[in-house]
Amino acid sequence: MEKHPIHAHRAPDLPVPVDESQPRPEPVHPHSPHNPVPQDEPVPNHNPELTPPGQSKAQL
């Protein structure tokens, strides 16, 4: 059973990115979490009277 040693701890033959410590110079996707879409940003509630009971953060 020990004719073929298993190299379980052998590193894969895949290119390992070395520049993980610095941001890669690639275009930021519009829906990237690093550059959120302005429409997706949480908008402050300017009409607290329209908030259903129990949903108002002022009552927490």
Image (cartoon, rainbow, N blue to C red):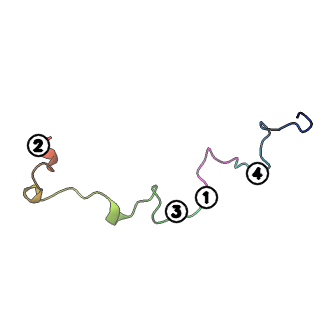
Looking at the rendered image, the disc whose residue lies closer to the viewer, 2 or 1, is: 2
Whole-percent x, y for residue 50 in the image: 9, 60
Mark 1 belongs to which amino acid? Pro
> Which residue occupies 72% across, 48% down?
16
Between marks 3 and 2 in the image, the one whose residue lies nearer the viewer? 2
Give the foreground label among 3 and 1: 3
- Mark positioned earlier in the residue sequence (4 or 3): 4
Pointer 3 or 2: first along the chain? 3
Q: Position of residue 59 (x, y in %)?
A: 11, 43
Q: Is mark 1 on a helix, strand or loop?
A: loop
Residue 50 placement, left or right of 20: left
Q: What stretch is highlighted in magenta?
A: 18-25
In the image, residue 51 sits, relative to residue 39, either above or below, namely above
Residue identifier under label 1:
25
Cα separation, mark 3 vs mark 1, equals 9 Å
Q: Name the residue under label 4.
A: 14
* Mark 2 vs 4, N-terminal side: 4
Task: Select label 1 or label 4 by which is in front.
Answer: 4
The numbered mark, 2 or 1, whose residue comes first in the sequence reads: 1
The kind of secondary structure element at disc 3 is loop
Amino acid of disc 4: Leu
Residue that numbered label 2 is attached to: 59
Residue 21 among magenta residues: yes
